[in-house]
Amino acid sequence: MKLVVFAHTPPPHHGQSYMVKLMLDGFGGDVRRRDITKPLPHGIACYHVNARFSRGISDIGEFQGTKIFLIFWFCFQAIWLRFRYGVKNFYYVPAPGKNVALYRDWLVMLLCRPFFTNVILHWHAAGLAKWLESENPIATRATTYRLFRPVSLSIVLSRYNQADAAKLLSEKIRVVHNGVPDPCADFEISVLPHRRERFDARRKILAGEWNVDPVLVNVLFIAHCTREKGLFAAAESVLLANRALATRGLPIQLKLTAAGNFVTEAEKSEFERLRQITKFATAIEHAGFVSGERKDRLLREADLFLFPTQYLGENQPVNLIEAMSFGVPIVTTRWRSLPEMLPENYPGLVADQNPEALAAAILEVLVTESGEQLRTHFTKHFTLERHLEGLAAAIRSVE
C-alpha cells in the first residue's frame, strides 16, 4: 500500500509532530530514502511531505504570509507524488479549533483531495466539532463539511473525539491509542524499589508517624509553559499543598519542577515576577526545555506528575503516557480524552484548574498511589508496538 503522509515532524517539537515521526520511523521511513531490499515493517510505503508551516511553538496556528506560499508548495509536492509514484492514499492531520489553522486545512483539501482516492484523517487534536458548532457561523461549518467530506477513514485516539470524525461523515472510524517506545524498560530493577521506598515514607509521614526523616516530594510538570496547559494552576496548587502540610506540622514539602518552553513573553514575564516572591522561588523551579538524559532523570526522580491542562486541542498527550511508563503517580484534569487514558476510578482526576481541588488531589495521590498500576496500564495500552500495529491495520483497511 502506498501512502502520502502530509504532516510535519520535529522541529518544532510537540506531541503531534513527535507521533508523526514515530509513525514514519515505524513504517520504515520515506520509501524514497530507504533500502528497497528490506521489507516494509507493516506493508505501507510512505511518501513524506514534511508540511512544516511553523518554525517554532509560538508560530503554530498564527497567520504569516509565508505560510500561504508554503501551502501551495507542499500541496504541489503531494500532487506530484500522486502522479510520479501512483499514490492514491492521502494521510492528513486536521487542525484544532483555530481559525487560521482551519483555513489552512480548507486550502489543502481544496487543492489535494481531488487527486486522491482515499483521504485518511488522524485526529491528534480534539474538539473541532464542538468548536465549529459553538463558535462559528453556518458558512464556516458548511465550507468545512463541503471541503472535507467524504472521508475514507478517520483515526481517533479516544472515544471522546469520535465526535470530530463523525461530524465529517467518515466512512470508517477507528480508535487507535497513541504509543511511545518504552523509555523505562528497566523499571522493575532501577525505578520500582525507589518508588516503593519513597511511597512508604510519604505514607508514614502523612499518617502521623514522626520517627522518619523529612521528605522532599519532587513534583514534575512537563509541557509548554502556558496557562492553558496548567503551569500557573500547578504552581499555586503546590504552594497550597505545602501550606496545608506546614499547618499540620508534617516534615514533608513539595517542590515543583516545570520543564518546557514559554510560548508567550507575557506568560514568561508573569512567571518571572512570581519568582521574586520567596515562597514561590523556593518551591517552584523552571528547568526549560528538557530531552534525553535530563528528561529521563527528572522522570525517574519524580514522585508526582502534575498536569492540570485545559488546552483547547488536548487529546491524548504524550507527556502523560511517558509519566505512566516511568510509574509516576499523576494528577490531571477531567478534560477531553484524559480520563480515558487512566485506569478506571483513578483518584488523581480533578474537574478543572481549581488550585484548592488540585492541592487536595495531590495530597491524596501521594498516599494512595505508588505508580505501579500506571506502569502496568502503560504496558497494556500505550506501547509503540501496539500503536503501530493498530495504526497500520486501520490505514490498510481503506484498500
Image: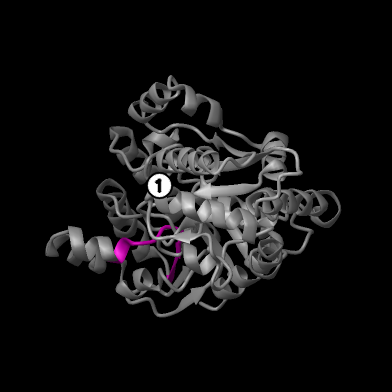
What secondary structure is marked by label 1? helix
Q: Is residue 246 left or right of residue 73?
A: right
Q: Considering depth in this image, is 243 or 52 the residue closer to the camera?
A: 243
Q: Is residue 294 left or right of residue 267?
A: right
Can you identify the residue that label 1 sits on?
355
Residue at 48 percent across and 39 percent down: it is 243
Which quadrant of the structure image shows residue 267?
top left
Expressed as whole percent of the image width and height from the top left, the position of residue 162 reads 40, 73
Q: Considering depth in this image, is 128 or 90 the residue closer to the camera?
A: 128
Colour setup of the view: one colour
Segment tinted magenta in the rendering: 117-129
Which quadrant of the structure image shows residue 47?
bottom right
Residue at 38 percent across and 22 percent down: it is 273
Q: Considering depth in this image, is 169 or 182 the residue closer to the camera?
A: 182
Residue at 57 percent across and 50 percent down: it is 319
Can residue 30 be spotted in the picture? Answer: no
Expressed as whole percent of the image width and height from the top left, the position of residue 141 reads 20, 64
Expressed as whole percent of the image width and height from the top left, the position of residue 238 reads 50, 41
Residue at 40 percent across and 25 percent down: it is 274
Q: Is residue 58 above or below residue 4?
A: above
Quadrant of the drawing holding the N terminus: bottom right
Q: Considering depth in this image, is 170 or 162 the residue closer to the camera?
A: 162
Q: Which kind of residue does numbered mark 1 sit on?
A: Pro
* Residue situated furthest top in the rendering: 276
Expressed as whole percent of the image width and height from the top left, the position of residue 354 reads 37, 50
